[in-house]
Amino acid sequence: MGRPKEFDTQDALAQATRVFWTKGYEATTMVDLLTATGLSKSSLYETFGSKRDLFLAALSGYCDERTQMMRELLQSRATAREAITAFFALIVEQARQESRPFGCLSCNEAAQMEAHDTEVQRVVARDLDAMEAAFAEVIDRGHADGSIPPQVDSRRHARFLNTLHHGLQLMARTRSVARMEDAVAVALAALD
């Protein structure tokens, strides 16, 4: 019978996620991951597999957590318009935080990974689909609550907002907050 794990798997995954988010997959070394998680090499491999397996788990977990946070925020405001405004205000505010890793892990890796990496493409595509669905749902809610006019097409505007979100995340890498604020203002006007 093997020894029980003496560490919190979720905490170790969260620490590894932060390293990948900060440095990117390619620049992250096993030493970086071992230092961040506090695990031995054997514990890391036994629990998560290879660096690539750990990265895919980190990326999937990050996307799931971010989508859940997004859905909760979009449902937390009285009107859909207020919810969309609050969501984008949060994105801009996060870009101001020096202690926060740059941009979005999913966006960063989509831009950096090889085009033929089907596993990462699959995770990123699932992330894009989930975010687009969340935007479409809130736009539909806006039609019902009167905060978004009925002529605003849910699917097309959801894709637009999703694209804006990902573009903002790339802008966040350079801390271009004023540009981000201008882009958000234009996007919110498109919902009129």
Image: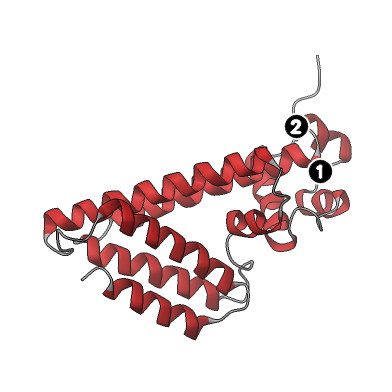
Which numbered disc flags the more N-terminal residue, 2 or 1?
1
> Measured from the top left, where is residue 145 in percent x and y?
12, 57
> Measured from the top left, where is residue 80 in percent x and y?
23, 60
| Residue type, mark 1 in image | Leu
In percent of the image, x 42 and y 69: which residue is there? Answer: 90
Q: Quadrant of residue 186?
A: bottom left
In percent of the image, x 65 and y 43: which residue is there? Answer: 120
Task: Give the residue at the far top of this rendering.
Answer: 1
**Quadrant showing the C terminus:** bottom left
Is disc 1 placed on a helix, strand or loop? loop
Question: Mark 1, residues whose alpha carbon is within 10 Å: few (<14), some, or many (≥20)?
Answer: some
Image marks 2 and 1: residues in contact by CB distance under 8 Å: yes
Is disc 2 placed on a helix, strand or loop? helix
Going by the image, does 95 lie left or right of 17?
left
Q: How many marks?
A: 2
* Residue indicated by mark 2: 47
* Residue indicated by mark 1: 39
> Measured from the top left, where is residue 52 in percent x and y?
76, 41
Task: Give the residue at the far bottom of this rendering.
Answer: 178
Going by the image, does 100 lie left or right of 138?
right
Going by the image, does 128 lie left or right of 30?
left
